Image (tube, rainbow, N blue to C red):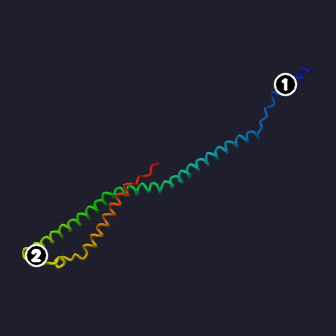
């Protein structure tokens, strides 16, 4: 009978299913949920901070565009100064020619002519001053723009 009892107790142990601790599995499932949440938060952070950083770069990109535009304008501004100088030189040469002719007429014919009777030179001094200012401003512009460098990141 002892043998039967021992055998039956062994059979009972074999037939008994292994116990599953559900609380333990719930914790493991919770870990997977936490991973999903962490991945979603990470994805959201990458998107948000990527956009924030891109927005922070907007002023730098604008600076790069402006500097490129300014450097492109250097030759135009230099041309403006050259054209002003040419126009000023032309007026000066023509004025010298007229003064020479007036002097010749005075010396050869004894005729005294006032240049202001021939041409109104009232604005010449003002125009020369403005022209000099334009040329100086152009030179300053070129000098300044040539010191600018695009941001390097």
The one nearer the camera, 84 or 7, is 84
Rendered position, 135 above or below 123: above
The one nearer the camera, 110 or 70, is 110
Callout 1: SS:
helix
Q: Is residue 46 left or right of residue 116?
A: right
Label annotation for residue 10: 1
Real-space Cα separation, disc 1 to disc 2, in angstroms: 147 Å
Q: Where's residue 107, x and y in %?
A: 9, 74
- Disc 1 versus disc 2: nearer the observer: 2
Callout 2: SS:
helix
Residue for point 35% across, 61% down: 140
Rendered position, 65 above or below 107: above
Q: Is residue 61 left or right of residue 105?
A: right
Residue for point 86% across, 22% down: 7
Q: Is residue 136 left or right of residue 96?
A: right
- Confirm whether residue 69 shows in the render: no
Q: Where's residue 91, x and y in %?
A: 20, 68
Residue for point 27% across, 71% down: 127
Q: Is residue 106 left or right of residue 32?
A: left
List the residue tagged with mark 2: 106
Q: Earlier in the sequence, mark 1 or mark 2?
A: 1
Q: Quadrant of the N terminus?
A: top right
Label pair 1/2, CB-CB below 8 angstroms: no
Q: Where's residue 136, x and y in %?
A: 32, 63
């Amino acid at each position: 009978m002892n043998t039967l009892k021992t055998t039956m107790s062994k059979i009972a142990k074999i037939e008994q299913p292994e116990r599953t601790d559900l609380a333990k599995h719930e914790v493991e499932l919770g870990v997977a949920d936490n991973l999903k949440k962490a991945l979603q938060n990470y994805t959201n952070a990458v998107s948000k901070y990527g956009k924030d950083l891109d927005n922070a770069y907007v002023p730098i990109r604008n600076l790069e565009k402006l500097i490129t535009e300014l450097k492109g304008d250097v030759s135009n501004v230099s041309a403006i100064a050259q054209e002003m100088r040419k126009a000023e030189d032309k007026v000066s040469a023509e004025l010298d020619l007229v003064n020479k002719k007036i002097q010749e007429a005075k010396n050869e014919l004894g005729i005294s002519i006032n240049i202001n009777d021939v041409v109104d030179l009232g604005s010449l001094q003002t125009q020369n001053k403005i022209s000099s200012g334009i040329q100086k401003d152009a030179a300053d512009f070129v000098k300044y723009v040539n010191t600018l460098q695009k941001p390097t990141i």
